[in-house]
Amino acid sequence: MTEVSLAGRPSRLPEPGPLPNRLQLTDDGQLRHMLTIEGLKRELLTEILDTAESFANMNEKAVKKVPLLRGKTIVNLFFEASTRTRTTFELAAKRLSADVLNINVDTSSAVKGESLLDTLRNLEAMNVDMFVVRHQESGAAHFIARHVAPGISVLNAGDGRHAHPTQALLDMFTIRRHKGDFTKLKVAIVGDILHSRVARSQIHALNILQTGEVRVVAPCSLLPADVDQLGVQVYDNLDEGLRDVDVIIMLRLQRERMEHAHLPSEHEFYRLFGLTSRRLQLAHPTCLVMHPGPANRGVEIESAVADGPHSVILEQVTYGISVRMAVMSMVMGVHQT
Amino acid sequence: MTPDVPTLLDDMAEQARHHLATRGIDNPIVVGIHSGGVWIAEHLRERLGVERPLGRLDISFYRDDFSRIGMHPQVRPSELPEDLDGEHVLLVDDVLFTGRTIRAALNELFDYGRPASVTLAVLVERDGRELPIAAAIVGAHMELGNTEQIKLRGPEPLRLERVAIEPAEDPDA
């Protein structure tokens, strides 16, 4: 991983691997921070999904809130734009009765030259309990987790190309609700794997849950160099990659991360790797179509498919709230003395 | 010697019929608290001939000890079959001890609407109350002091078991 400067102060970021688990789990294996899916045990993922299940039927209640995190303060610390992720984290916190502070860093103190650690220390001095962090640099959430005061939890809401664990968890929740057992499933992840922190977290989660077959479908220029170590089948042809799959996860073409020319054109990408109604017929008849959003219609997915009967894209948004409630309540639970 | 659960259930059903009749309630919603309370509630509902589906509460999200012991590892969804506005609720648990579980259950119930009344029915009422909560329908009274607990084992067959309290154990039954 590279030497990066987080708003002024250069720091060595921790490598992904065994270290994050020493950081994100307590000595007895409970979740303390949520930084990455990699290395988590199947039992823990299942416990998160089961807890989320209890939050998922809250909509039947007249009062759509529980008092669990009453008196806690949760800070959404976003160094990168986001609508869906930030708002669902905010709603999750509010439905747990926590108080929420939204800080959009490129419009606040970062502009005035305050370092990340100064920002953290100031927020800690306001007695906050949790940081939900999104940052354009891989490893940023780990960096913050290493430096926060002991009683504070850190949730990674997306760091660079590295991880987006709660997105992967809500995807697993959506798949489990529709399909049940993962061991019999064929799942295809299609598109820009290289720049996608979502894909990385999904691949780890699917493998931990012992999914029958995990495929990635992408042009070679959009595959990471370590793809053969991820435990996936690689396809460079969409028609072949979609055959008989039970779940298709489309990824957003990350135009803002395309610093080099990885693709001839968006039109060419759609022709080769766009999910169309015709191609959907190659998959299993009850196949789910998923997308972490926001979808580029006509670039990676046809509008008729995104809005069609196989699509569970809006359910993913709904379940995102329950899954984030589950993670927030679990990490806050372990800090107590 | 611990009391026989089916005998206690027969007695509770008799008390419940009397309680409901004197108040003119003919169609209560029976709600059990996970997990022992749900087992008792199922049997009570059957004995009372209540046709409306059983409600189930998991009070994990309403406990007052979250800030001490964190999240309960096995949370199950609460299921209330209908809106509670204006309804008479028969709230059922296995053991009434400190009263904290019932306080949490009442808070959760009121997030589902404003019931006309809530009646508490418990299989065993023991000593050790820490809150002003009392049951109207009681299977058995027991004095256990601070060295013993009473646990309901089940679901088939249902039986009560006296166990010694371990020093580190959570006292909220």
Image (cartoon, coloured by chain):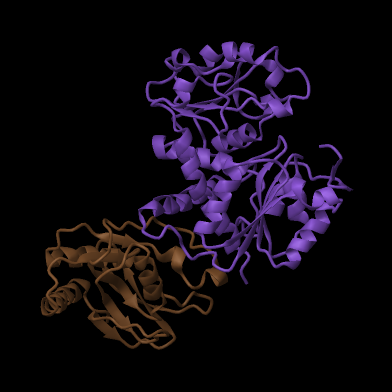
Chain colours: A purple, B brown
Q: Residue at x 45, y 60 (%)?
A: A65
Pick the front one: B59 or A320:
A320
Q: Residue at x 42, y 15 (%)?
A: A281
Is B148 positioned to the left or the right of A77 in the image?
left
Is A239 positioned to the left or the right of B95 in the image?
right
Is A7 positioned to the left or the right of B113 in the image?
right
Image position, residue A251 (x, y; %): 59, 27
Q: Is residue A35 above or below residue B116?
A: above
Q: Is residue A330 above or below residue A280?
A: below
Q: Quadrant of residue B152?
A: bottom left
Pick the front one: A261 or A47:
A261
Q: Quadrant of residue B107?
A: bottom left
Image position, residue B99 (x, y; %): 38, 79
Is A264 positioned to the left or the right of A8 in the image?
left
The answer to whether one can see residue A149 in this image is no
Screen quadrant of the C terminus of chain A: bottom right
The answer to whether one can see residue A70 in this image is yes
